[in-house]
Amino acid sequence: MLRRLRVGVLSMVALTALLYLLVADRAGDQMAAADRTRQAVDDLTEAREAAVRAKDELRKAAAATGEVDLIGTGIGFANATSGVSTLLTSATKGNAAGEQGLHHIQFVQGQLTTCLQLASGPQGAAAAIPAVEDGPEQDDEGRDVRFTGGLIESLEDLREIEILALDEQLRSRWLNPYLLWPLFITPVAVMLLLACASSYVVARHFRQYPSPALGLALLATASVAVTACSDPLLPGKGWVMAIALPLLIAAGGLGYVAYRPRIDEYRFPHP
């Protein structure tokens, strides 16, 4: 019986260690992906600001002369549109909206190309301004339809889609402490029951006090579990892992030592 109880206690320590490593890996990956998406949202915010500057440059060029095609739209417009293109490419790396997000990014890149072609055409800035600043169409209920407006509006629509994807990433079960509590507390609770059963057997059949090492093993395992549940990002931090893993190894050693004196009493030589 004691051997089986010892195997059960050591199994719970090992299970806690495996869960700890799993959460550290998955939560770290989810947070890294969220950071990339957050950077993509920042890139799209800057791209929209650059598109607004491009619109202002077009308006200046259109107001300056009716022959913009002879003088061009200016270096300011070229710099602004170049910035939009660069930021869109950068945002692609952090896209979290899947194929739909990539499709929308390609659509906005196509809008940017159209704006550049119109600005360099016969009508110049006057033709390109609507393609940059047009508002979105509305459905039968008066709501804006995404990606039906100009470049500025499409960049804002793309930014909103990535923000929604970011929110979904941050709601991942691996980043939710409330979902991790049952995952970690279950092996600790089982270990507590096994420790209580072990204490009963030792007190009833051996007339001995339970080994303090068993209590220390339970305390060490529970402390690691609570730490992992309190903040899913903690297990992945180097200094936390440097403490938690040796602590679990020590818990396993203490659990093994706690049973050894009583088990040794039954090791009689065979005739």
Image (tube, rainbow, N blue to C red):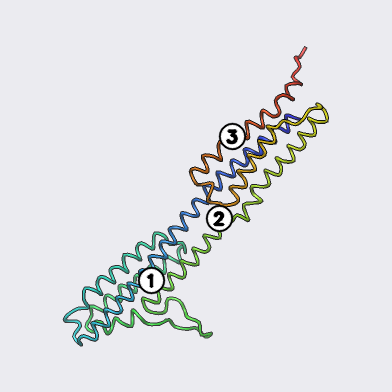
Left or right of 62 in this view: 271: right
Q: Earlier in the sequence, mark 3 or mark 2?
A: 2
Q: Which mark is residue 107?
A: 1
10 Å neighbourhood of mark 3: few (<14), some, or many (≥20)? some
Q: Position of residue 186 (x, y in %)?
A: 68, 46
Residue closer to the observer: 215 or 118? 215
The residues bearing labels 1 and 2 have C-alpha atoms spaced at a distance of 33 Å
Q: Secondary structure at mark 2?
A: helix
Q: What amino acid type should be assigned to the residue bearing mark 3?
A: Ile
**In 3D space, how far apart are the residues under numbered discs 3 and 2 (Cα atoms)?**
25 Å
**Which quadrant of the figure contains the N terminus?**
top right
Q: Nearer the viewer, mark 1 or mark 2?
A: 2
Q: Amino acid at mark 1?
A: Phe
Residue picked out by circle 2: 175
Residue at position x 35%, y 72% from top?
A: 49
Q: Nearer the viewer, residue 163 or 144?
A: 163
Q: Which residue extends farthest right?
A: 204
Quadrant for residue 194, please give it. Answer: top right
Numbered marks: total? 3
Q: Which residue is mark 3?
A: 249
Quadrant of the frame with the C terminus: top right
Residue 68's disc is none
The image position of residue 105, as x and y in percent, is: 39, 68
Q: Residue at x 67, y 28 (%)?
A: 257
Disc on the earlier residue, 3 or 1? 1
Comes first in the chain, label 1 or label 2? 1
Q: Report helix, strand or loop for mark 1.
A: helix
Distance between the Cα atoms at labels 3 and 1? 54 Å
